């Protein structure tokens, strides 16, 4: 029997990259997974791979009506919810001196506001033993040149877990942060190319980028009872990048 047998999970940003890898691992461990994302084609492809224990809901975490529709689907189809992996995120480089209000709004609407309401709107469906996982980043600890908005938004996500762990005292719901470093997602491979991937990998003691499946494995750990005495914690899965 899998570690997540019978559990119901929501994964935002679940159609590609880390979200899809986590969804695959969750399904392998026995969970039923709702994946949420903006691109129907990617959602359809993910569900085709994941099989009958996954379904897709299209929408954006920055649109509160879309989130309402997501959780209405969860309630109608499954009745309750055990795991929320608030993974959807956005970030692009814009150095100090060129930052615009629109750039800040776009990043924080997804990474901070989107995370807050992904979790808040899930709570009525959750109960004792529930696990909330937030996707942080090594950039939230170390900073990243040119990524002011992204780094600041991920530092905010780290604090959300600390605050919410206090807010959820007595409920039996845990809140933790999973903070990847450079990960070889489809998007990263396309953006960086082979030489860029080598350069990012060389920044870590392990001398490589992460495979999305490695991040998904840690997400499954945080979702399961194996991490039952963990809350308000940050788990760095960054090849040592932010640890030295």
Image (spheres, rainbow, N blue to C red):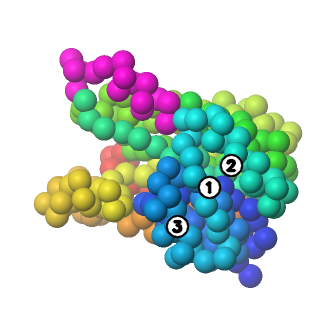
Label 3 element class: helix
- Quarter of the rendering occupied by the N terminus: bottom right
> Disc 3 and disc 2: Cα gap in Å?
16 Å
Answer whether labels 2 and 1 touch (C-beta < 8 Å): yes
- Magenta stretch: includes residue 107: yes
Res. 44 mark? 3
> Disc 2 and disc 1: Cα gap in Å?
6 Å
Determine which residue is flagged by label 1: 57
Res. 28 mark? none
> Disc 3 and disc 1: Cα gap in Å?
10 Å
Residue at 36% x, 61% y is 185
| Relative image position of residue 66 (x, y in whole percent) | 63, 41
Label 2 element class: helix
Determine which residue is flagged by label 2: 70
**Quadrant position of residue 34:** bottom right
Please indicate whether residue 191 sits to the left or right of residue 168 in the image: left
Magenta stretch, overall SS: helix
Mark 1 closeness class: few <14, some 14–19, many ≥20 residues within 10 Å: many
Q: Nearer the viewer, residue 113 or 198?
A: 113
- Magenta stretch: includes residue 217: no
Q: Is residue 129 visible?
A: no
| Relative image position of residue 232 (x, y in whole percent) | 64, 41
Q: Which residues are magenta?
A: 95-111
């Amino acid at each position: 029997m899998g570690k997540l047998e019978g559990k119901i999970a929501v994964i935002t940003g679940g159609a590609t990259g880390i979200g899809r890898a986590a969804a695959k691992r969750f399904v392998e461990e026995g969970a039923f997974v709702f994946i949420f994302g903006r691109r129907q084609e990617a959602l359809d492809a993910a569900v085709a791979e994941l099989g009958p224990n996954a379904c897709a809901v299209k929408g954006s975490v920055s649109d509160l009506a879309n989130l309402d529709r997501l959780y209405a689907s969860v309630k109608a189809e499954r009745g309750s919810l055990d795991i929320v992996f608030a993974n959807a995120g956005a970030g692009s480089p814009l150095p100090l001196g060129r930052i615009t209000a629109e750039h800040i709004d776009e990043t924080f609407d997804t990474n901070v506001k989107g995370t807050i309401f992904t979790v808040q709107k899930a709570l009525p469906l959750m109960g004792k033993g529930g696990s909330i996982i937030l996707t942080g980043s090594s950039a939230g600890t170390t900073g990243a040149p040119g990524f002011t908005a992204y780094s600041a938004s991920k530092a905010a996500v780290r604090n959300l877990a600390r605050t919410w762990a206090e807010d959820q005292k007595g409920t039996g719901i845990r809140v933790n942060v999973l903070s990847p470093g450079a990960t070889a997602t489809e998007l990263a491979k396309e953006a960086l190319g082979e030489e860029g991937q080598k350069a990012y990998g060389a920044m870590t003691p392990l001398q490589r980028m992460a495979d999305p499946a490695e991040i998904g494995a840690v997400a499954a750990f945080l979702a399961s009872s194996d991490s039952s005495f963990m809350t308000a914690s940050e788990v760095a899965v960054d090849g040592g990048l932010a640890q030295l």
